[in-house]
Amino acid sequence: MNRIRVLLADDHEIVRQGLKALLDGQPDMEVVGEAADGQTALDGTTTLNPHVVVLDVSMPHMNGLAATREIRQRAPASAVVALTRYGDDAYVKELLRAGALGYVLKQSPSRELVAAVRSVAAGRPYLDSSLAARAASGMMNGRSRTAGEPRITDRESEVLRLMALGHSNKDIAAALDLSVKTVEVHKANAMRKLGLKGRTDIIRFALLKGWLQDP
């Protein structure tokens, strides 16, 4: 039986060691490469041609979202499983839009990752079972459904970015030549579309999108 070739990408060595032990212990899997950042994960994928890339979302040099997009463009035969602590709607939607075929939470039982690797290697999407209720409601029934959902506008993006950078509604209104009320409307609309619940969610989303790297 041909084994599923897996590349692991996580910036914490101890996490990679645990994941490697888990997957190498499966009779149908072998870890063929490791990476500590997004750029190395991309380079390793194009060199090693793994069947599956298990990709931490929060990594230096190139985060998981950007790495997923690049992998899908440059190594389309390699399926991506996003691995993260966050189950926010915005995280899930963005990673699926970028081309991830699987999404697993780090706090879930190890069987979730094993099942995800097998599923995506066979060309089937996999969503962490703790997110099953939202999937069943139709929020994320595969990438084709997700791609059709409303996206935030450029103005809504700018408002969220400035909020994540610590600016008040009043400051944002002045910077964008808007009223405070309009800023509040843009903020509310964006948070509703993305499923964000508060400032912490906004900051995490901004990190995912790379907005906080801007000057």
Image: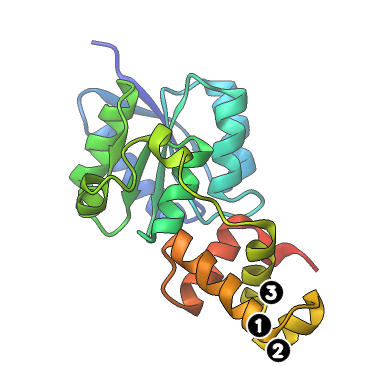
* Color encoding of the figure: rainbow
Secondary structure beneath label 3:
helix
Looking at the picture, how far across and down is residue 68, in whole percent?
54, 38
Q: Is residue 114 visible?
A: yes
Question: Is disc 2 in contact with disc 1, using a CB cutoff of under 8 Å?
Answer: no
Please state which amino acid type lies under the numbered disc 1. Gly
Question: Is disc 3 in contact with disc 1, using a CB cutoff of under 8 Å?
Answer: no
Cα separation between marks 3 and 2: 11 Å
- In the image, residue 99 above or below residue 109: above
On-image quarter of the C terminus: bottom right
Cα separation between marks 2 and 1: 12 Å
- In the image, residue 19 above or below residue 31: below
- In the image, residue 10 above or below residue 67: below
On-image quarter of the N terminus: top left
The mark lying in front, picked from 2 and 1, is 2
**Residue at left offset 35%, top offset 59%:** 87
Locate residue 117 relative to residue 11 in the image: left or right.
Answer: left
- Give whichever of 81, 166 is nearer the camera: 166
Number of the label disc, if any, that sits on residue 102: none
User: Residue 177's quadrant in the figure?
Assistant: bottom right
Count of labels shown?
3
Secondary structure beneath label 2:
helix
Q: Which residue is mark 1?
A: 166
Q: Which residue is mark 3?
A: 162
Locate residue 81 relative to residue 94 in the image: left or right.
Answer: left
Number of the label disc, if any, that sits on residue 170: 2
Looking at the picture, how far across and down is residue 100, in whole percent?
44, 37
